[in-house]
Image: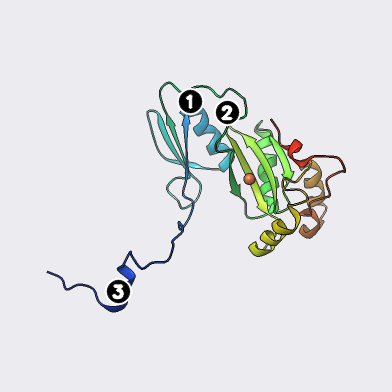
């Protein structure tokens, strides 16, 4: 029989004396679907993903070192979305490494016939939203600030005036990006025109 752990090891292994612990990371999202193949194809395309495993009624999609980021499961008797606003999760957001990757992905998807649902500069991010074939919304974004605390400061200081953002035209942003305009300018959220309620920008 082993002796009980002592000293540092003992306190490290104690679960009673740990401070409040947050999860180490957000791992994956699982979607219940009526058509696992259609969603598998769509997520592989938009995420540049792979399928580590699939079987009857189930598929897992990965795009980095995590074994899966999206799980798709066909469940019986699922109701179609009514299209009406509903409570619950609104969208899943994915961050790209830089604005060039975001805009290149926009262009690649457009060429594949996948049009964005909502391009918006949130201030803290430049974001392009899409809807999957069953109406789930995903957000592709790039951070507008290199330092996370600067984004938090921006949120604290500017979201009172507008917590949603300002829409933009991706093609116009691509033209500005390719002309060599500095990222410091490209990332700036313009002022919302007077009289516009930012919540009205959110598409139905
Ligand atoms: Fe978001």
Side of 193 where 113 appears, left or right: left
Give the percent coordinates (x, y) of residue 140.
63, 45
Front-most of residues 136 and 18: 18
Q: Secondary structure at mark 1?
A: loop
Residue beneath disc 2: 133
The earlier-in-sequence mark between 2 and 1 is 1
The earlier-in-sequence mark between 3 and 2 is 3
Picture quarter with the N terminus: bottom left
Residue occupying image coordinates x 79% and y 46%: 173
3 or 1: mark nearer the eye: 3
Side of 143 where 191 appears, left or right: right
In whole angstroms, how far apart are the C-alphas of marks 3 and 2? 51 Å
Residue beneath disc 3: 9
> In this rendering, is residue 43 above or below 151?
above
Residue occupying image coordinates x 47% and y 24%: 34
Residue beneath disc 1: 35
Front-most of residues 99 and 163: 163
The earlier-in-sequence mark between 3 and 1 is 3
In whole angstroms, how far apart are the C-alphas of marks 3 and 1? 50 Å
> In this rendering, is residue 155 above or below 118?
below
Give the percent coordinates (x, y) of residue 186.
79, 54
Q: Secondary structure at mark 2?
A: loop
Disc 1 packing (10 Å; few <14; some 14–19; many ≥20): some
Front-most of residues 192 and 195: 195
């Amino acid at each position: 029989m082993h002796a009980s752990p002592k000293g540092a090891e003992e306190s490290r292994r104690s679960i009673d004396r740990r401070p409040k612990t947050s999860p180490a990371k957000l791992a994956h999202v699982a979607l219940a679907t009526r058509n696992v193949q259609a969603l598998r194809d769509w997520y592989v395309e938009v995420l540049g993903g792979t399928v580590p495993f699939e079987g009857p009624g189930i598929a897992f999609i990965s795009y980095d070192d995590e074994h899966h980021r999206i799980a798709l499961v066909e469940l019986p008797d699922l109701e179609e979305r009514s299209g009406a606003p509903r409570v619950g999760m609104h969208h899943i957001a994915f961050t790209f490494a830089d604005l060039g990757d975001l805009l290149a992905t926009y262009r690649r998807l457009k060429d594949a016939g996948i049009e964005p649902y909502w391009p918006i500069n949130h201030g803290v991010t430049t974001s392009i939203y899409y809807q999957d074939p069953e109406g789930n919304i995903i957000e592709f974004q790039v951070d507008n600030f290199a330092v996370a605390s600067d984004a938090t400061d921006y949120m604290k200081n500017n979201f009172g005036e507008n917590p949603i953002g300002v829409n933009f035209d991706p093609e116009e942003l691509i033209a500005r990006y390719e002309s060599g305009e500095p990222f410091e300018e490209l990332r700036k959220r313009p002022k919302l025109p007077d009289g516009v309620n930012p919540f009205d920008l959110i598409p139905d």
